[in-house]
Amino acid sequence: MNPKIRAVLGALAGIVAGTIIIGGIEMFNPLFVPDDTVLETNEQLAVYLKPLHFTAFIPLLLAIFLGAAVAGFVANWISKPTQYRPALIAGFGLFVAGLMNLLAIPHPIWYGIASSLLYFVGAWLGGKAVTKTAK
């Protein structure tokens, strides 16, 4: 198979795998909004999120890091040896989805910065893990 096509398919598969991991971990996050809380607008959500301690966001950051690492691993594993960077492309795809989430839902600024960096760090480390296992 053409290496370019393999790299694109690997990056897409990585994005799908990373999205599944992130969504799965976030679904089981014990810090979801209580059932009796009504959050119909972004302003209500911002009021709910503002007093939360930073430790409430740690499971979300962990989900992002693990999802990005899996995305990078899957992308490079499918792509095999190539001069392209499918792991970082997968990380960028997850970053774009995360950026849309940050723009749609109010988050603390520090969380936006940390999560944005974790997409690329996780994807890079996941991609490096494939090259280490291949040797």
Image (tube, helix red, strand yellow):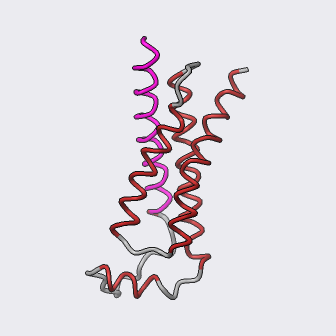
Q: Please give left or right for residue 51 compared with residue 37 in the image.
A: right
Quick one: quadrant of the N terminus?
A: top left
Q: Residue at x 62, y 39 (%)?
A: 126
Image: 121 above or below 109: above
Q: Please give left or right for residue 37 compared with residue 89 in the image.
A: left
* Res 93 quadrant in image: top left
Residue 2: % across, % down? 42, 12
Q: Please give left or right for residue 129 compared with residue 97 in the image.
A: right
Image: 99 above or below 76: below
Whether residue 91 is in magenta: the answer is no
Instruction: Work out which residue is located at the far top of the displayed protein and give it.
Output: 1
Residue 96: % across, % down? 40, 51
Q: Residue at x 46, y 25 (%)?
A: 7
Quick one: quadrant of the C terminus?
A: top right
Q: Main secondary structure of the magenta part?
A: helix
Whether residue 24 is in magenta: the answer is yes
Q: Residue at x 66, y 34 (%)?
A: 128
* Res 5 quadrant in image: top left
Q: Residue at x 58, y 63 (%)?
A: 114
Q: Nearer the viewer, residue 109 or 53?
A: 109
Image: 133 above or below 28: above
Residue 124: % across, % down? 61, 40
Residue 16: % across, % down? 41, 41
Image: 99 above or below 88: below
Where does the magenta region start and end? 1-26
